Each structure stands twice: as C-alpha cells, then as structure tokens.
Image: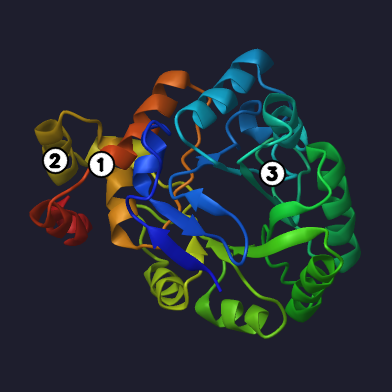
C-alpha cells in the first residue's frame, strides 16, 4: 500500500526539491514529492532528439543536484529519445526512481495513438528495460487505456510483468475512478497520472480517491504556465507577495492540496528548472490557499 512518509523528513542539504516532503510509491521507493517530467528534453513535437543533447543532459543532472529523485518519462517521448538521454545522464540511478510509460504509438511529431495490445505492452517494457539499462523498472505506467482492447487484458499484462519481476510498481494515466477500481481488481496500482493544475481540476474526484487510498497522484501539465500568465489576479498577487513566479505558486498549491500529490514539472531550461524546484520551499498560508481554491472565476 502506498503511504505518506513525512513533510520534513528530507535530509539537510539535499536540495530545494527535498522540501516538498517524501512519499513511498507502493511497497517500493521513497521519493521527494516534487519530481521531474522528461518529455520536454526531446525535439519539437516531442519528436526526435533535442537541438542540444548536452543541454538536456545538463538539465537532468541539475534536477538531481536540486533534490529531485523521481524522474518520469515514456517510451513515446522521442520516441525512445528521453529514455536514452536519461540513461546517458543518470545511469546507474543511485538513489533515483525512474518511472516510464508505454501504450502510445507515435505516427509523427505531435501525434499520439493509444495501443494497449498485451503483446505490444510487453514488447515496450522489454525495450525500456534495455534503453534504461536496468533489470527492473521502478514504476511502469499504462500511458493510456486503449478503448479497442479489453481493459482487463491491458491490466493483466501489467500484473504479469510485475509477477515476473520486470516492473516493481504499476501506474495508470488518464483514468477515471471506475477504471482505477477495475484495474485494482487485477493488479496493485501505486500511482495515477492525470492532467491536473490550478486551471484544470476535472480530475478532482480521482485526486480525492487517490488521497483516500494512498495512491500517488502525478499531475501532468502541472503548471499550465500560459493560462496562468493570462489569468493574473490572485495568482499574480500571491506570487508578488512572496517574490516568486506564478508557476511556483501553482506548484506550491499542488503540493499543499494533497499529501499524495507528486507534481512532475518538465523543462529543457536550467533557469525554469531552478524556479520549479524552489517551489517546494514556498508555503502558502490558509488565506492564499482559500483564494486559489475558490475557483477560476476569482483567479
């Protein structure tokens, strides 16, 4: 069962991301609750290599220096590119948890097609093991539930891979409460990764379910920076009062919203990375949280 460890357990000097507190993923690793999403270290359209691979490697290594020990990627980021860069930058991953995903085909830049055939998911797991150069994947997530394949078959192959020792923990992405419960009848679910941020709270019911059941919730697109910049209002005022940026406020709000929240902001820019990690040190007071919780009409 997934469990919260503490809010202040991080070792002194571990980097600003450690201030987010820690969380145990399933029966496995304890991670700092502010992680790093490795989608944006690829080329435009999440396709091919970045223009400057060395810069991408520098970002990954700097994230670890800043206290990040949860790196989230997918076989489809590139495809393959993100996993390969992570191996080059961070292998043998001492003290790190590497999460990856399978279940999306990439016909071209910016194009995504769910594929949950059991044989395909098994194949992609084997390829991720090879690219990451590990014997077991820390957290293997179904990137999308393929509506053309029986869901039980997709969850079943994840259970098989776990039983074979090829994956340690299982996660799901973009799922409803009903789908999580269906999956949990077949395999233990350690994490859920749904789109969620200050301006998109459609998965509030899923977050509530995860919080009640000790399942890690990894919000993708956690900052929604463009929308925040347009909103101004409460976000801008709170950011100004603390001398921080709007994205830092958005990340701090997420971290304080639930003890199972594991934001994974991604960037290919060192300055943005530094700002994101320092969001873990920002503590919003109750009045500020209330303003942000009030809803989009007051932002």
206 sits to left or right of 254: right
Residue pointed to by mark 3? 111
Q: Is residue 238 above or below residue 202?
A: above
Quick check: marks 1 and 2 in contact, CB under 8 Å?
yes
Residue pointed to by mark 1? 249
Give the distance between the C-alpha atoms of the residues marked 3 and 2, in whole angstroms.
Answer: 37 Å
Q: Decide which of tag 3 and tag 2 comes sooner along the chain.
A: 3
Q: Quadrant of residue 46?
A: top right
* Colour setting: rainbow
Residue 77: percent from left, percent from top: 69, 39
Residue pointed to by mark 2? 238
Can residue 166 be seen in the rendering of this structure? yes
How would you rate the neighbour count of disc 2 (Cα within 10 Å): few for under 14, some for 14-19, many for 20 or more? many
Q: Is residue 251 above or below residue 119?
A: above
Q: Residue at x 51, y 78 (%)?
A: 177
How would you rate the neighbour count of disc 1 (Cα within 10 Å): few for under 14, some for 14-19, many for 20 or more? many
Give the distance between the C-alpha atoms of the residues marked 1 and 3, in whole angstroms.
Answer: 31 Å
Q: Residue at x 51, y 50 (%)?
A: 31
Label 3 sits on a secondary structure element that is loop
236 sits to left or right of 16: left
Between residue 287 and residue 44, name the one nearer to us: 287
How would you rate the neighbour count of disc 3 (Cα within 10 Å): few for under 14, some for 14-19, many for 20 or more? few
Label 1 sits on a secondary structure element that is helix
Residue 298: percent from left, percent from top: 13, 54
Quick check: marks 3 and 2 in contact, CB under 8 Å?
no
Q: Decide which of tag 1 and tag 2 comes sooner along the chain.
A: 2
Q: Residue at x 80, y 76 (%)?
A: 156
Q: Residue at x 17, y 35 (%)?
A: 239
């Amino acid at each position: 069962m997934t469990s919260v460890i503490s809010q202040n357990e991080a070792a002194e000097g571990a980097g600003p991301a450690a201030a987010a507190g820690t969380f145990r993923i399933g029966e496995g690793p304890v991670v700092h609750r502010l992680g790093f999403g490795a989608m944006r270290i690829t080329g435009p359209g999440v396709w091919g290599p970045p223009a400057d691979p060395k810069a991408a490697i520098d970002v990954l290594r700097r994230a670890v220096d800043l206290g990040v020990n949860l790196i989230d990627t997918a076989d489809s980021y590139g495809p393959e590119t993100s996993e390969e860069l992570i191996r080059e930058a961070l292998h043998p991953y001492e003290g790190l948890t590497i999460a990856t995903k399978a279940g999306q085909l990439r016909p071209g830049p910016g194009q995504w097609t769910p594929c949950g055939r059991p044989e395909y998911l098994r194949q992609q797991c084997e390829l991720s093991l090879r690219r990451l150069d590990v014997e077991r994947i820390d957290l293997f997530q179904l990137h999308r539930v393929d509506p053309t394949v029986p869901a039980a078959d997709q969850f079943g192959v994840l259970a098989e891979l776990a039983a074979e020792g090829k994956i340690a923990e299982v996660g799901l992405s973009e799922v409803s409460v009903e789908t999580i419960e269906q999956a949990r009848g077949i395999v233990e679910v350690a994490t859920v990764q749904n789109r969620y941020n200050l301006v998109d709270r459609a998965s509030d019911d899923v977050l509530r379910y995860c919080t009640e059941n000790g399942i890690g919730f990894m919000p993708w697109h956690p900052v929604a920076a463009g929308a925040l910049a347009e909103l101004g209002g409460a976000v801008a005022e709170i950011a100004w009062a603390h001398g921080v940026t709007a994205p830092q406020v958005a990340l701090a709000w997420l971290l304080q919203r639930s003890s199972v929240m594991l934001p994974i902001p991604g960037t290919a820019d060192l300055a943005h990375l530094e700002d994101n990690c320092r969001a873990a040190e920002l503590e919003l007071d109750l009045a500020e949280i209330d303003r942000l919780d009030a809803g989009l009409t007051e932002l």
